[in-house]
Image (cartoon, rainbow, N blue to C red):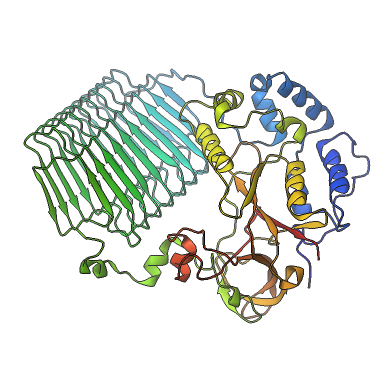
Amino acid sequence: MQVALGGAGEESGKPVAGENPFTPRASLLRYWNKQIGSGLPKSTFLLSKASPLSAVESATFTKLAAQNALSDNLPAFCKSANLLCFPDLGQSLEKHDASSNFAVYSNKNFTNYGTDGLGGTDAFTKYSEGVNLPVDAFKRYSRDSVGNNDKFDNYGREGNVVDQSFSGYGAGATGGSGEFKKYNEEVNVPNLRFNSYTDDGNGRQQSFTSYTNETNSGDESFSSYGKNGNGSPNEFTSYGSSSNVIGSTFTGYGETGNAANDTFKSYGFDGNVPENNFKKYGDGGNAGTDTFISYRDQSNVGDDSFKSYAKNSNSAEVDFVNYGKSFNEGTDTFAGYGKGATNHKINFKIYGVNNTFTDYAKKGISFSRYTNKSSETMTSMAVSGSSVNRWVEPGKFFRESMLKKGTVMPMPDIRDKMPKRSFLPRTISSKFPFSTSKLEEMKKIFHAADNSSMEHMFTEALDDCERAPSKGETKRCVPSIEDMIDFATTVLGRNVVVRTTQSVEGSKQNLMIGSVKGINGGQVTKSVSCHQSLFPYLLYYCHSVPKVRVYEADLLDPKTKANVNHGVAICHLDTSDWSAGHGAFVALGSGPGRIEVCHWIFENDMTWTIAD
């Protein structure tokens, strides 16, 4: 049986003949030899992530970092160091005909485009489709136009880390329409911002159909959307449907609008942990109508917050039909809902569980078939096991008893979907600011605008790295391989190896377990597992948790018995501190502290263990 040392056991880590001894890689090899005493072959898997900088480049960029001057040389630094950086978009004041067709287009800044336009149609078809890091900006687009139609069809589809902003879009426009179809579908980590979208608009219709469907993670924000609008209907259909952990924020949406008509159909339907936040939505509006149909229906958990929704409005009508009927309880908070409103009607029909209403209007609100947590109608929410596990991929979690020869089980999709990046050498990473208190310095270095994807990357990574460790956990975020080695050897000692699943072969297929080996004799042991964070350079969240067992297993084709892969799995024996809503318990049943939970090590993740 082979040993999966993060590189399939290949002889690795020896200096290449003629290699400059001052490159970051050569320096790393010397550090590895000094700090790790196992004498086993070094991991080709981990060394492949070392900085590609030459000796001269490393010295140059180290000096610039020490002088706080990397920001002025960012494009060259990003390219040479293999980092994740967004292009800097200059303003585009290009002139176009009244009707323009933008196809197979990407990374553009449209400023004052279509201002005062009369009639015509602008079509964006397959715009930024399949682009890894699309950055698109629309500023004051179609401002004060009359009867102009904008169509975004298959916009940004299958992108990776997407950054798009619409600022002052359609402001003061009369008539016409904005149509988004299949916008950012199947995208990984979208960051979409609509600021002052159709402010002061008159009779302009906006529709979002199949918007961010089947996307992964990410955030969307609508700020002052439709503010002071007059008779401008907005429709969201299949918005965020079947998406994973999408956050949407509506701030000042339709504020002081007149006769607004907004419809949310199948919004967040069948999603996993959708987070929606409505602040001052419809505040001060007149004669508006809002309808939520099958909103967050059949989703897993999820949280919604409505603050000052329809507050101080006049003759507002709001209908919630089949709202929040998720199969795992979410949390809905209504604060100041309809407060100060006059002549309003707010109806809740077939409304979900676990909801809080604070300081809301006591008149003009009706609840019909509200599902109380303890009521018998909870049974009507039961769904099939396959539906419950919709967001827990088969094989993602399994029991320890399944790790035996002959067991056939599904292998989840273990492929890494993050952008390819490299580590920085410690001589450079150690000079970078890295804390919430220094966020503005971090943004300056990487040219990150406010509320941009880059800023979101920073804040999410910092949140993970700065949060207190859980019970029994030892944790550290490492921006270099040298830092990772230090953490692993501090926890485990110098006699360590790093292990990962050999490849992504067999993903999303049924595989048979072949030979199984328990690391350290299959005894309860320590390990240090490291998981990627989304960041400009490789940053790993490494942590050690107590009471685990680590296994290696050959993975075979069930029919031919041919070897497909060689997997590394870790079994957590103490789950008492896990959340009751953790996906492992959704998939396997039971609850915290009652069962052990195992999972495979995914592509580009790893676990360090004491060498056998």
Tell me, yes or no, if residue 237 can be seen here: no
Q: Nearer the viewer, residue 539 or 335?
A: 335
The number of numbered badges drawn on the structure is 0
Drawn side of residue 194 relative to residue 31, left or right: left
- Nearest the viewer among 428 and 182 is 428
Residue 208 visible, this angle: yes
Can you give x and y, in whole percent of width and height, for residue 520 in the image? 76, 68
The single residue placed furthest to the right in the displayed view is 18
Is 542 located above or below residue 255 in the figure? below
Q: Residue at x 67, y 28 (%)?
A: 432
Residue 470 to residue 305: above or below: below
Q: Position of residue 411 (x, y in %)?
A: 57, 68
**Farthest residue, direction left:** 343
Q: Along the horizontal axis of the image, is 414 left or right of 42?
A: left
At x 72%, y 40%, the residue is 480
Nearer-the-camera pick, 380 or 239: 380
| Image position, residue 402 (x, y; %) | 59, 76
Residue shown at 77% from the left, 22% from the top = 63
204 shown above or below 240: above
Left or right: 400, with 34 as reference point: left
Query: In x, y percent, where is residue 266?
Result: 28, 52
Instruction: Name which quarter of the figure residue 65 lies in.
Output: top right
Q: In the picture, residue 226 is in which quadrant?
A: top left
**Which quadrant would the N terminus be assigned to in this image?**
bottom right
* Placement of the C terminus among the 4 image quadrants: bottom right
